[in-house]
Image (cartoon, grey):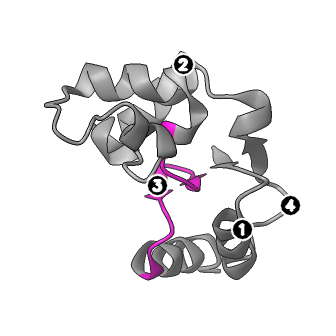
Amino acid sequence: MQKVYYLSSCDTCKRVMEEIEIPSSFIKQDIKVQGITEEELDELFNLTDSFEELFSRRAKLYKEKNLKGEILLEEDYKDLILEHYTFLKRPVIVYNDEIFIGSSPKTVAAAKKSIHKN
């Protein structure tokens, strides 16, 4: 699979996708428009073995729901991501059997190297 989960209104997502030079062959899914299904989230989980790794603590709702002090289980992270798209850390780039989550320089460099290794 070659897919990117992102937000079209997010400047960071746009910058990362530009920097990596995402090929036109990739499926680009704007999670605000299309959302993310449980099946898609489970596919991402299969690459990470962690819903927590896919979860964004920077989401406004994280603060609004006072989740900082809560002890969340894997199922809680999954439910929250399915409840609202902003809980998905972004962008999420899937390239064959590799997954790259977020916008850290290390992640961006690894994704670019993997995608453009030929």
Question: Which mark is on residue 78?
Answer: none
97 part of magenta stretch: yes
54 part of magenta stretch: no
Residue holding disc 2: 39
| Mark 4 nearby-residue class (10 Å; few <14, some 14–19, many ≥20) | few
Q: Residue at x 59, y 34 (%)?
A: 85
Question: Is residue 86 positioned above or below 97 on the image?
Answer: above
**The C terminus is located in which quarter?**
bottom right
- Verify CB contact (< 8 Å) between mark 2 and mark 3: no
- Circle nearer the viewer, 1 or 4: 1
Q: Earlier in the sequence, mark 1 or mark 2?
A: 1
User: On the image, which quarter does residue 12 sit in?
Assistant: bottom right
Task: Report helix, strand or loop for mark 1.
Answer: helix
Q: Amino acid at mark 3?
A: Glu
Question: Is residue 3 positioned above or below 101 on the image?
Answer: above
Q: Is residue 10 left or right of residue 73?
A: right
3D distance between C-alphas at marks 1 and 2: 27 Å
**The N terminus is located in which quarter?**
top right
Q: Earlier in the sequence, mark 1 or mark 3?
A: 1
Question: Which mark is on residue 24?
Answer: 4
Q: Residue at x 44, y 72 (%)?
A: 107
Residue holding disc 3: 98
Task: Report helix, strand or loop for mark 2.
Answer: helix
- Observer-nearest residue: 18 or 70? 70
Question: Is residue 76 positioned above or below 67 on the image?
Answer: above
Q: Amino acid at mark 2?
A: Glu
3D distance between C-alphas at marks 4 and 3: 18 Å
